[in-house]
Amino acid sequence: MPRITVIGSLNMDMVITTPKIPVIGETVLGSGFAMFPGGKGANQAVAAARLGGDVTMIGCVCEDFFGKELISNLANNGVNISHIQKTDNCATGVAMIVVKDGDNLIIVDPGANSKLEEQQIQNMELIIAESKMLIIQLEIPQKTVLKAMQLARKHNVQVLLNPAPASKLSDELLALVDICTPNETECEILTGITIKQIKDAEKAVRYLNKKDIPIVIVTMGAKGVVYNQGDKIVHKKATRVRAVDTTGAGDAFSGAIAVALTQGVALADAIDFASMVGAITVTKRGAQASFPSIEEVRAFKAEII
Ligand code: ADP
């Protein structure tokens, strides 16, 4: 089976609900505390593995409790964890999420994610070279991202960049991308084009094509996706579902596109597949908890046809 290598972040998300946001120096009683494995890298690795992909994750955690938990969660989802790096001079990445009346306050400490260095990626050249596709995001240092992409290009490995969190990127880096999957916000930051309507996304796709990215797929939530098939721009509507929590939809979409394309599925069909995966994800709460298995996608497809 074609191997997918994911290079990216691993975080432990800690969620607590509060009736009141405390002021400086104040303590309040919250409720419903829970921890969820996250990080865009790990999320995309899990999404692809649940869909039947042969997935190897490269990332960095600390040798602490959360680091061990995150690694065992990936292993339990069938992701190859042998190349995850461990550091002992900081903490594993965490996100502290405070929820009040459905709104969030979030503090992220990237911790070990920011210790994933170019040299460690250089040491993984063979792993990258033996992959069919590299999936990468921007929650690790940008120099590390560039190094990984350069190695992928050297070995003719396709690069899928999910450019999240939203950042401006150099033309040098963009030219190393084969497939780019920004959401509307990420697309605006990348291109400087405000994305309100489908025609704005079309403009942005053209702009990124001109930056030497052969396939650009702008994900637009319930509005679906706008992408290019060669010179032709296509708008694919989203599958209509009752959305309860959109967390992780983009991660599920990127993982799914990678699985389909590496298995030789044509682009339009791969987009259909990933859109179904995104739609299923928003019908359930949580990020990884809502990613479907390949069997769930088949059952969903049978229902909507
Ligand atoms: P992100 O999570 O990065 O913001 P999106 O919200 O654009 O990404 O979601 C990715 C994809 O998931 C969408 O392009 C669409 O295919 C699917 N999706 C997201 N939200 C919905 C929704 N409310 N209804 C149906 N499909 C959705």
Image (spheres, rainbow, N blue to C red):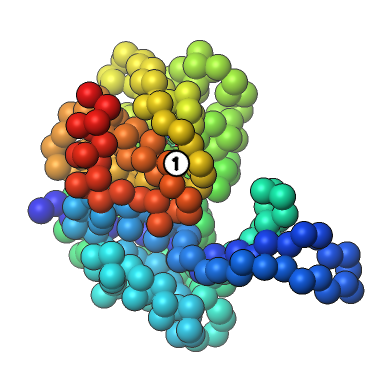
- The residue that appears at 20% across and 53% down in the rendered structure is 53
Circle 1 SS class: helix
**5 horizontally vs 184: left or right:** left
Residue 48, horizontal then vertical, whole percent: 28, 51
Circle 1 sits on which residue?
A: 282
- Asked if 2 appears above or below 264 in the picture, the reply is below
Q: In front here: 141 or 103?
A: 103
- Asked if 302 appears above or below 114 in the picture, the reply is above
Residue 226, horizontal then vertical, whole percent: 41, 22
Residue behind label 1 places its C-beta within 8 angstroms of ligand 1:
yes
Quarter of the image containing the C terminus? top left
- The residue that appears at 55% across and 17% down in the rendered structure is 197
Q: How many marks?
A: 1
Residue 65, horizontal then vertical, whole percent: 48, 84
In the image, what residue type sits under mark 1? Val
- The residue that appears at 51% across and 41% down in the rendered structure is 244
- Ligand 1's quadrant is top left
**181 horizontally vs 93: left or right:** left
- Asked if 3 appears above or below 87 in the picture, the reply is above
**115 horizontally vs 153: left or right:** right
Q: Is residue 176 visible?
A: no
Q: In front here: 133 or 250?
A: 250
